[in-house]
Image: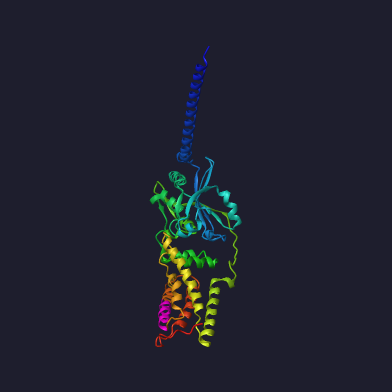
Amino acid sequence: MTTNREQVARGSGLGARGREQGSKKWFICLLLVFYSSVISHHSSFSQTLSPAARVSLITYGSGDDDISSAFGHTEIRLVDPMLGMDRDYSYGGFDYRADYFILKFLRGTLPYFLTVHNLYQVIYYYQQTNRSVREQQLNLSPIQRQRLFVALEKNYLPQNREYRYKFYYDNCSTRPRDMIADVCGDSLTIPSRSLMTGKSYRDLMNDYLNEKPWYQLGMNLAIGWPANEQTDGWLAMYLPDQVHDQFAHATVRQANGQSIPLVQSEQTIFAAQKTFRQQVPLYLDPDVVFTVLGLLVALFTIRRYVVAGKVDRWFDRLLFGVSGFLGWFLFVLWMIRDDGVTGWNPTLLYLMPLHLPLIYWATRSTATAQRRTRYFGATAVLLLLGMALSKIPGGFDVIFPLTLLIRCVVNMQPVWRNEQTPMRVA
């Protein structure tokens, strides 16, 4: 017969052993969870593709949804029927819900990331938006296919999948190009790789924006001199269609030394309907809008200055103030972006940031003729220089500077007049 003290001692001993066993179980569970996560991340690396595996390049056509769909898209498709695998690797993912999305987008620091999906999970979207879907099956050896698979899966790890998107240099088209070129090595030959295209980055971009005139104007205003660099075949492959077309003429050398076409076969999964849709009415086209603006400014100036002999300083403050505001926006865009695309922008010569606030200094009621002549004379020189250097398609880089030039001529009073006599302003 045991005493109460012995029973308590035994009970406490059993409780201690129970807690110890429970702790061990929790520790074992944690180890299992940890190793299972490690195994799940790396199990794909240990998978060996079957001989039936195939690799394809998927090219999506351009769309009318928004500016992000205007240039098309490229993905790598890997199919292995023996493993039940059908995976599309896309470098075009980004999160609209990211903190400070607009600021990061403007700065060029918005993280893009690799996503993986099944082609037929997204095909309906491209059909509904009338965007073509083309597939090029590639002639890769089993070793090259395996290397590509491992590289893509490694790139898909959470710590690796994000990258810094750069419009011309590192995007959802150049990444698939680079992945395929890396696994092929020097066995890959792209005949047009080093041949000059005769077009700059800007020219190639504008080929896709002719029916989107306001997008075209905005992007051309924002990008600077680096966009005028002439491209060769390799650089031109920042566009999906260029990757598609140049891969179609590429060859790959086999182990026996024989070169075969890189593209084994091609099929059109969905053919977009050829339709013509004017994106904006003619009266809202930028060239029309700014031509009308220029004519209105000219008529107003003639009526007020030539007929009434008056110069309206409020009008100059409005025109040059808006110009300066836009200039400051472009200047800040140049300063905050680190991809270099917005740098050395000649647009700033006629959208001069310093007009805001200097236009108020130049149009003060006490401003002398000499001050106005110097200010607007210097502005006129910059306007003419900006017109000469600008590469914006259409007529904006001529029409808008000419509009400002009209006001410069009006404000440049003869210096032989009494410089202490203020201009006649209203």
Could you tell me residue 191's position as x and y percent? Answer: 42, 58
* Rendered residue at 42%/83% (across/down): 369
- Establish if 252 lies above or below 388: above
Q: Nearer the viewer, residue 74 or 263?
A: 74
The colour scheme used here is rainbow
Q: In this rendering, does residue 261 appear at all?
A: no
Residue 340: percent from the left, percent from the top?
A: 41, 61
Quarter-wise, where is residue 382 in the image? bottom left
* Residue located at (55% from left, 47% from top): 118
Q: Is residue 379 magenta?
A: yes
- Above or below: residue 88 compared with residue 352: above
Does 361 sit above or below residue 132? below
273, 255: nearer the viewer: 273
Instruction: For residue 160, say whether it is visible.
Output: yes
The question of residue 190 being in magenta is answered with no
Q: Residue furthest top?
A: 1
Residue at 50%, 17% (x, y): give it. Answer: 5
Q: Main secondary structure of the magenta part?
A: helix
Where's residue 401, x and y in %? 47, 76
- In the figure, 137 relative to 298: above or below? above
The residue stretch that appears in magenta: 369-381
Please state the horizontal and vertical placement of residue 331, each as a whole percent of the image. Answer: 43, 66
Work out whether residue 147 or residue 223 is closer to the camera in this orientation and state it: 223
Disc count in the image?
0
